[in-house]
Structure formats: structure tokens, C-alpha cells
Image: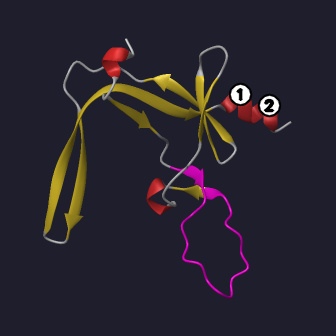
Amino acid sequence: SVKNDIGKLLLIQLPDLLPLIPQKIPDENSTEENKVSLSSLRNSKDGLIGKLQVHRSGKTSLVIGNIPYKLRSGTRSDFLQELVSIKAVENDGYVINLGPIKHRLVCTPDVDQLLKSSH
């Protein structure tokens, strides 16, 4: 139930490359606008990367850079998986345990929707 899932972690698995606006340092002489291109999250700006849509049917999708993605339940695992944050600095660093992952969603491009929009 939803009441029991408050405070539980949800892992969303994204494709390696996404249509994101790459992070660039503004140049005074540059008139180039931020263009959407395939990029990894590592090269993107902080903040909003897309919009989560909940349809009347109850299905959910994620729209990133005008490309729709389907969200489906990931495979259940019978073993403990925990999410951690790792901060590595040269020869030092630390790990923070954020908690166990209770649910997993897999994000895949909605090929049917892409084909419909290309016609």
C-alpha cells in the first residue's frame, strides 16, 4: 500500500544517453543557443530533466527532450539492494547509505510514439 511505502526508495533505470541540454560555461562572444543533443546525465545541467506523465489509463511515461519514454516495473529481486552516495576526492572519500531500494522502474524509449510522430 502507498501508506507503507512512504520514505521508501524508488530506482529509475534510464538509458545511457538521453536528449539533454549539455552543460556549458556561458561565453560572452557566443550567440549559440542551448541545443538538445544526446548526452549522459554526467554532462547535463542540475535540475529538471523531463516530465513524468500519468495517463488516464494509469500508465506512466517520462518525456525527456520531446522524446517519450515508457516506464515499466523492473524485475523483483530476492536479495537486498541498497542505494549509496559516493564522494571520491583523490585519495580520500566517503560513502553514505541512503537505504534499501524497494521498487524499480525501467525507462525505455516509446518506439510506437516516435514512429507515429515521424509521419
Which residue is painted at 37% across and 21% down in the image?
Answer: 75
Q: Main secondary structure of the magenta part?
A: loop
Total labels drawn: 2
What stretch of residues is rendered in magenta?
17-37
Residue 25: horizontal and vertical position, in percent?
A: 54, 77
Residue 27: horizontal and vertical position, in percent?
A: 61, 83
Q: Are marks 1 and 2 in contact (CB under 8 Å)?
A: yes
Q: Which residue is mark 1?
A: 112
Q: Secondary structure at mark 2?
A: helix
In this rendering, the answer to whether 1 lies above or below 34 is above
Magenta segment includes 16: no
Q: Which residue is mark 2?
A: 116
Which residue is painted at 47% across and 54% down in the image?
Answer: 41
Please give the label number shown on residue 4.
none
- Quarter of the C terminus within the rendering: top right
Which residue type carries mark 1? Asp
**Label 2 Cα crowd, 10 Å radius (few <14 / some 14-19 / many 20+):** few
User: Where, by quadrant of the figure, is residue 28 drawn?
Assistant: bottom right
User: Where, by quadrant of the figure, is residue 102 drawn?
Assistant: top left
Which residue is painted at 50% across and 54% down in the image?
Answer: 47
Give how far apart the Cα atoms at labels 1 and 2 are: 6 Å
Residue 80: horizontal and vertical position, in percent?
A: 19, 26
